[in-house]
């Protein structure tokens, strides 16, 4: 029996290292992975409660339409009809609560337009794209286009 187990050491050592690795992995996972992770899918369940506690920052398009009927009508008539107001103008919940106190900043039009419309091969061919440096250098987009309904 001694000869049978004398060569087993080369199997026992890797097995011990493997088991030690599993134990270390379990300990590390227990300390790093937050409680509740995986309870409702591949995310941390506590994140839902944390997000609910944050203040609401976006008002929604219906709130914008209550006061800014002209802008909404122009936008709905143009190619930006599917773009939310707050996608360009930023979060407006504070403005909706008190329009005189919280004025949203006027967006930088050139930077705003190029964020979506700068020419890129990654965008679909049907999407309106411009190479802004060649399109009309020196002027901002709103000198020729109305942002809510950007046709010339």
Image (cartoon, rainbow, N blue to C red):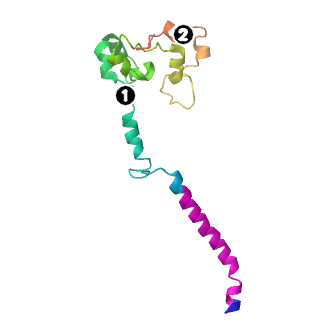
For the stretch drawn in magenta, the main secondary structure is helix
Q: Residue at x 57, y 60 (%)?
A: 25
- Which residues lie in the magenta part? 4-28
Q: Within the image, what quadrant is residue 49 found in?
A: top left
The residue labelled by disc 2 is 140
Residue 119 rendering spot, x and y as whole percentages: 56, 24
The quadrant holding residue 151 is top left
User: Residue at image x 57%, y 64%?
Assistant: 23
Looking at the rendered structure, the secondary structure element under dot 1 is loop
Residue for badge 1: 56
Q: Residues within 10 Å of mark 2 (few under 14, many from 20)?
A: some
At a point 71% along the width and 86% down the height, the residue shown is 6
| Magenta stretch holds residue 11 | yes
Could you say which disc has been placed on residue 137 in the image? none
| 129 in the magenta segment | no
- Residue 82 appears left or right of 3: left
Q: Secondary structure at mark 2?
A: loop
Mark 1 against mark 2, which lies toward the viewer? 1
Q: Quadrant of residue 118?
A: top right
Q: Residue at x 43, y 15 (%)?
A: 104
First in sequence: mark 1 vs mark 2: 1
Give the Cα separation between the discs numbered 1 and 2.
33 Å
Q: Nearer the viewer, residue 142 or 61?
A: 61
Q: Position of residue 62 (x, y in %)?
A: 30, 22
């Amino acid at each position: 029996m001694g000869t049978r187990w004398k060569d087993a050491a080369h199997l026992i050592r890797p097995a011990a290292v493997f088991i030690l690795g599993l134990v270390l992995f379990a300990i590390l996972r227990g300390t790093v992975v937050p409680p509740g992770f995986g309870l409702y899918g591949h995310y941390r369940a506590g994140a839902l409660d944390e997000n609910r506690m944050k203040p609401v920052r976006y008002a929604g398009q219906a709130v914008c339409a209550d006061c800014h009927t002209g802008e909404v009508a122009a936008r709905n008539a143009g190619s930006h009809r599917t773009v939310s107001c707050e996608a360009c103008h930023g979060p407006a919940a504070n403005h909706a609560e008190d329009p005189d106190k919280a004025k949203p900043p006027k967006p930088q039009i050139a930077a705003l337009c190029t964020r979506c419309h700068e020419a890129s091969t990654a965008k679909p061919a049907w999407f309106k794209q411009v190479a802004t440096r060649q399109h009309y250098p020196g002027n901002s987009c709103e000198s020729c286009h109305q942002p809510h309904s950007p046709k010339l």
